[in-house]
Amino acid sequence: MTFACALRLWASVSSTTQVGLEAYKFRYFGACPLLLASELLEMLLEDLKGISTEPWSLLNNVAFLTFFLLASAAQDGDKLLEGEECVPHSQPWQVALFEHGRFNCGASLISPRWVLSAAHCQTRFMKVHLGEHNLRKRDGPEQLRSVSRVIPHPRYEARSHRHDVMLLQLARPVHLTPQVRPVALPTRCPRPGEACVVSGWGLVSDNEPGTTGSPTSQVNLPDTLHCANISIISDASCDKDYPGRIGNTMVCAGVQGGGTDSCEGDSGGPLVCKGALQGIVSWGDVPCDTTTKPGVYTKVCHYLEWIRETMKSNCMWFLLLCLALSLGGTGAAPPIQSRIIGGSECQRNSHPWQAAVYHYSNFQCGGVLVGTHWVLTAAHCKSDNYQLWLGRHNLFDDETEAQYVQVSDDFPHPSFNLSLLKNNTRHPDEDYSHDLMLLRLKHPAQITDSVKLLDLPTKEPVEGSTCLTSGWGSTEPEKFQFPDDIQCVDQTLLANEVCDKAHPQKVTEFMLCAGHLEGGKDTCVGDSGGPLICDGIFQGITSWGHIPCGSPNKPAVYTKVFEYLQWIKDTMEAHP
């Protein structure tokens, strides 16, 4: 640490009125790692060597040093104030960023090879620590990774704090364990009043109740990860606290009256609401424990497209995980992305065969329970890591009737062209036939009112049939917004010639065409792999379609299940 770095720290705690200083600060100490007082003293004394040794000069240096240490201890008395130590490893996505061996910022693991943090946390020699709880102890689950690429948002502005987001590509993937796993990216933006948890190793206050911000406040950097419960603050309310400073790329969170907040050292860390990463700790008022203003976070939902495109363009083509992001589709040829447009929330337990297929902890596709050990889905939903839920209605609520089941193996149809996933293409001459896959469950599903099997078809579908599709896909045609609750929409089974004329891609005899020619009702991103049920019979698997979803004269295309009955039977019998 240089003397200049110490001066920046001193300025931040002694005054916010000097030229060039702002009252609203990032949640870390400038570009300097967070240090304990003893470390600061040692390093500052080392930096003082060579400075004038005249008695008055030395006295001034010592006076400055004393003032700096006292000021930093007295004024920055803030943290996840009123929070407490997290249950160890309850935030397995939490990352600690280190610079030259010293803790600098927080961050979030969003895939085995990608970490999301704040752009203002960027330093030259970052190391990523995962599976940490106590930064001063090693208890087994910790993993250390180097950073191969640092990608701050191209429009990041330090002064205005806009676009304060950064992606870090790890030199090698992490090993997923109960203590190290990704957090889900959001499928919608946060709502005012929504309950959230913010976590980090930032400054903590050990004030007695009622003494927050008092002259005797004591602050320290905790060894252990701390958590605090806060709520989303409306944009209108936050704009009153920070007039003209809150953009649509930011979201505010805190508690009524203040006292619970993120602070220096928490920068880059996660704000998690209902299991989804909604915010990145960015900036706020200081001192954190005396202010009644909320903290300001980078709004993650605003950057989903940038995150997806950046990860896809910076990953090797054969890494399928790059194609399976948390936006609901695999990223395989954009036509193979589907959802519910123009529908409504399904009646609870009306689709007990519906499965929710996750790529790691990110929702990816739908599926259909066709045997106690078997789920049928789309082949383009293939992943290198599955998590699967049955009996779900709301993806974010704690539903006691829901069942989490592990997948022991996957069986994409052997004739499906897997190069479509690798190349991420959608050329007119490409054939998306045979887009189905069987997932074998490690343990059998428990049949209940919320979890039931769906029978395979015994006869061909009939053109003109009334059909029903369901899923958690986007409810907006282009600006993808994903519902919490499963949605249903009616469709009409059309002649394949209709879809063949509507799309440049081939529509074969292994596919079905369904939708509404007037538009407005459709499947879309996130519904892939879900069922098409016609006249009460399971006939199709949601496969691909046009984007924007629900466009007139652009019905969606489904895999025709009836054509694959023998393959399904043979595969299931070969792997009892």
Image: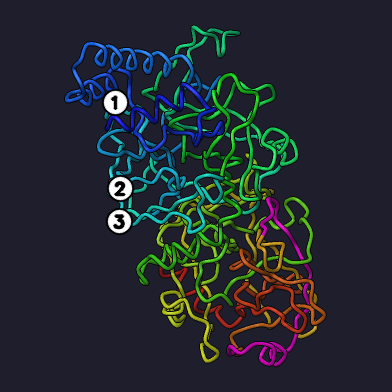
Residue at mark 1: 136
Q: Is residue 185 above or below residue 47?
A: below
- Type of amino acid under label 2: Arg
Q: Residue at x 45, y 69 (%)?
A: 573
Compare marks 3 and 2 and give the one earlier in the sequence: 2
Q: How is the image coloured?
A: rainbow
Percent of width and height locating residue 327: 57, 60
Give the side of residue 110 with respect to residue 285, left or right: left
The CA distance from mark 3 to mark 1 is 26 Å
Q: Are the two marked residues, 3 and 2, in contact with CB atoms closer than 8 angstroms?
A: no
Compare marks 2 and 1 and give the one earlier in the sequence: 2
Q: Which residues are magenta?
A: 481-506
Q: Residue at x 70, y 73 (%)?
A: 549
The CA distance from mark 2 to mark 1 is 23 Å
The CA distance from mark 3 to mark 2 is 11 Å
Give the side of residue 14 with respect to residue 190, left or right: left
- Type of amino acid under label 1: Arg
Residue at mark 3: 148
Q: Residue at x 29, y 42 (%)?
A: 143
Tell me, yes or no, if residue 87 can be seen here: no
Residue at mark 2: 124
Q: Nearer the viewer, mark 3 or mark 1?
A: 3
Q: Nearer the viewer, mark 3 or mark 2?
A: 2
Q: Nearer the viewer, mark 2 or mark 1?
A: 2
Mark 1: secondary structure: loop
